[in-house]
Image (tube, grey):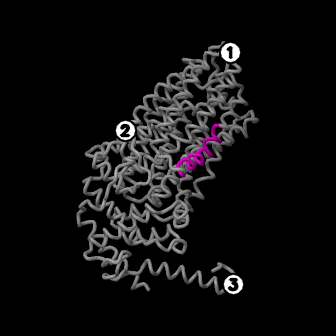
């Protein structure tokens, strides 16, 4: 039937939507036959397991196109909340690239003599490290707070509160008169940024099926790239100014984000997985229906999907008795916490912190201020669109583990090349080659480690402990970021160690160690449901055998407490719906 050809057809489509929604809300007869002809619901727990099994089979058989048709609303809401990361990427690009801005250096730097004998205004290496790491310190505070707050009050309200705080903290950036004010602003703004770092990943992984999980979680990395690209663009666009507005206007642009994001997130549904963990199964079902488009995929059944969530929650409750930070280091969750933490840390240990100072580094390598910023624009442009290349690699069937291993191998070679360029006698040619090599490094990084990390940390942590596991991983990322953020300015600052290209040798060695770790410890989660990953970790399957090992999560015995609560909650939900009708 052709949609929208006349009023009659329009009413037919509308009525179909209403009938589908009503059918999803209505209770099922207890003795209804299932798809294979067997009696439906010999007992409450059997009914739940059957529904969970059906939902799991449908997720495994769901193609990418089917997932997009069924979950377009989930995609939209996830993209909206992930946009919060744009703000963090924007500020990271600002502060690290302001060190190469003459107006910024005149305001906040000191006149000093470089190793080449010239007098220049420079923010000292100590203050560069201090300001850049101020945000990292704030992020660690925000991450620790988030581990408790978001799990208690929900993802939406936590993000909205952080956006409100951020709108106030930006004023400190805009009015800063010295480096101490910048330090305070970085620490305070880092607190909500730390919350965004984990909640965006968790929300993206919990509102979509297996077919979309890799795409929506890795999209968060694109948001980083968007923020960095906009940040460098704001600096370049105001570089012609010789006054303080050259850096105050870019800081003021941060106010454009909070208000529209708050409005959008107020309208967004809560994560159904969070609601299931808190026993709000009727609300979880309503959220799930708001995330899907039933008229596009009639094979979807909300009760079956909620049953799968409850079954997974019950299975994790059996495996993991508690849900505190301490439980992340107990039993099988210790391994999951270790791998998640290292996946995060590898981003910085493979040379990412080195690339964050690209503009300043290229200037010290011999490029002029204007050319260095254009190279940085190219780098951050690659960061923005690199996720599209990663999606292509994921779509053709290349696994997360494979991308990590081959990506680290390529980055190791590139960093070695960068170091050897320091031996070239023609410094102008070497500086241009260095800029080109950094662009190649950025491309490989975004196709592999930079993007795939977001999918790995979302999939390898359990639902019950995901927020806290991802928080711990991001804290380690930030700790490594602090260390690298301290030593990197000294490596490239002409008034300090002045290593120049030779810093590439240091990061090449670090990258090689990351490659060895990844081969032996990082498993392949692609195509697995959360319950299957739980079981693979419980069985202590080797990382190299994760992809080939077959598991049946429904052969495992699960306690009746969660299952009975499911049946009771759904019964109450159905009764309320009947009364409302």
Mark 1 neighbour class, 10 Å CA radius: few under 14, some 14 to 19, many 20 or more: few
Quarter of the figure with residue 231: top right
Secondary structure at numbered mark 1: loop
Q: Which residues are magenta?
A: 379-395
Tell whether 180 sits left or right of 542: right
Q: CA distance from mark 2 to mark 3?
A: 60 Å
What percent of the width, then of the height, locates residue 274?
39, 61
Where is residue 168? Give x, y as percent. Answer: 55, 49
Considering the image in quadrants, where does the N terminus appear?
Answer: bottom right
Residue 387 lies in the magenta-colored region: yes
Q: Main secondary structure of the magenta part?
A: helix
Residue with the mark numbered 3:
6
Judge depth for marks 2 and 1 and give the one in front.
2
Q: Residues within 10 Å of mark 3 (few under 14, many from 20)?
A: few
Q: Could you tell whether 514 is left or right of 84 in the image?
A: left
Q: Nearer the viewer, residue 406 or 537?
A: 406
Q: Is residue 390 magenta?
A: yes
The reply to whether discs 2 and 1 touch (Cβ–Cβ < 8 Å) is: no
> Farthest residue in the right direction?
240
* Observer-nearest of 185 and 40: 40
Residue highlighted by disc 1 = 118
The reply to whether residue 280 is in sight is no
Residue position for label 2: 521
Dot placed on the residue nearer the N-terminal end, 2 or 3: 3
Residue at x-position 30% and y-position 73%:
47
Q: CA distance from mark 2 to mark 1?
A: 49 Å
């Amino acid at each position: 039937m052709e949609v929208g050809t006349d009023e009659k057809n329009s009413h037919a489509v509308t009525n179909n939507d209403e009938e589908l929604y009503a059918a999803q809300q209505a209770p099922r007869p207890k003795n209804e036959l299932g798809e294979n002809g067997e009696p439906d619901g010999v007992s409450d727990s059997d009914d739940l397991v059957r529904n969970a099994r059906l939902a799991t089979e449908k997720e495994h058989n769901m193609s990418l196109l089917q997932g997009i048709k069924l979950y377009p609303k989930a995609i939209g809401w996830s993209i909206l909340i992930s946009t919060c990361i744009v703000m963090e990427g924007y500020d990271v690009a600002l502060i690290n690239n302001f060190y190469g801005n003459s107006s910024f250096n005149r305001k906040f730097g000191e006149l000093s003599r470089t190793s080449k004998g010239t007098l220049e205004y420079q923010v000292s290496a100590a203050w560069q490290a201090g300001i850049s790491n101020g945000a990292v310190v704030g992020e660690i505070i925000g991450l620790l707070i988030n581990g408790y707050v978001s799990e208690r009050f929900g993802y939406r309200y936590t993000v909205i509160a952080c956006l409100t705080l951020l709108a106030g903290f930006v004023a400190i950036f805009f009015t800063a008169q010295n480096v101490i004010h910048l330090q305070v602003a970085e620490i305070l703004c880092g607190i909500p940024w730390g919350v965004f770092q984990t909640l965006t990943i968790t929300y993206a992984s919990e509102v979509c099926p297996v077919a979309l999980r890799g795409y929506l979680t890795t999209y968060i990395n694109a948001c980083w790239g968007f923020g960095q690209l906009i940040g460098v663009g704001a600096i370049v666009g105001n570089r012609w100014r010789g006054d303080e507005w050259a850096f105050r206007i870019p800081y003021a642009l941060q106010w454009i984000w909070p208000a529209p994001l708050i409005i959008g997130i107020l309208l967004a549904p809560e994560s159904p997985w969070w609601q299931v963990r808190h026993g709000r199964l009727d609300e979880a079902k309503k959220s799930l229906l708001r995330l899907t488009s039933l008229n596009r995929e009639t094979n979807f059944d909300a009760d079956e999907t909620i049953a799968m969530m409850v079954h997974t929650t019950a299975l994790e409750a059996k495996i993991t008795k508690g849900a505190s930070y301490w439980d992340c280091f107990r039993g099988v969750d210790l391994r999951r916490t270790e791998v998640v933490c290292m996946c995060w840390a590898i981003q910085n240990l493979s040379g990412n912190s080195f690339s964050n100072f690209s503009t300043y580094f290229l200037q010290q390598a011999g490029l002029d201020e204007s050319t260095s910023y254009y190279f940085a624009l190219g780098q951050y442009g690659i960061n923005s669109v690199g996720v599209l290349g990663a999606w292509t690699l994921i779509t053709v069937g290349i696994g997360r583990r494979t991308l990590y291993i081959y990506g680290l191998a390529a980055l190791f070679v590139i960093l070695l090349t960068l170091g050897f360029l320091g031996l070239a006698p023609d410094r102008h040619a070497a500086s241009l080659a260095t800029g080109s090599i950094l662009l190649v490094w950025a491309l490989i990084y975004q196709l592999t480690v930079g993007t795939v990390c977001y999918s790995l940390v979302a999939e390898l942590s359990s639902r019950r402990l995901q927020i806290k596991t991802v928080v711990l991983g991001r804290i380690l990322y930030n700790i490594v970021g602090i260390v690298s953020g301290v030593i990197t300015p000294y490596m490239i600052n002409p008034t300090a160690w002045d290593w120049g290209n030779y810093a590439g040798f240091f990061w090449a060695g670090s990258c090689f160690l990351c490659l060895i770790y990844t081969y032996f410890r990082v498993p392949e989660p692609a195509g697995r449901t959360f319950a299957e990953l739980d079981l693979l970790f419980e069985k202590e399957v080797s990382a190299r055998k994760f992809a080939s090992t077959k598991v049946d999560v429904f052969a495992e015995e699960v306690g009746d407490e969660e299952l009975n609560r499911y049946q009771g909650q759904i019964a109450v939900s159905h009764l309320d719906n009947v009364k409302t009708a």
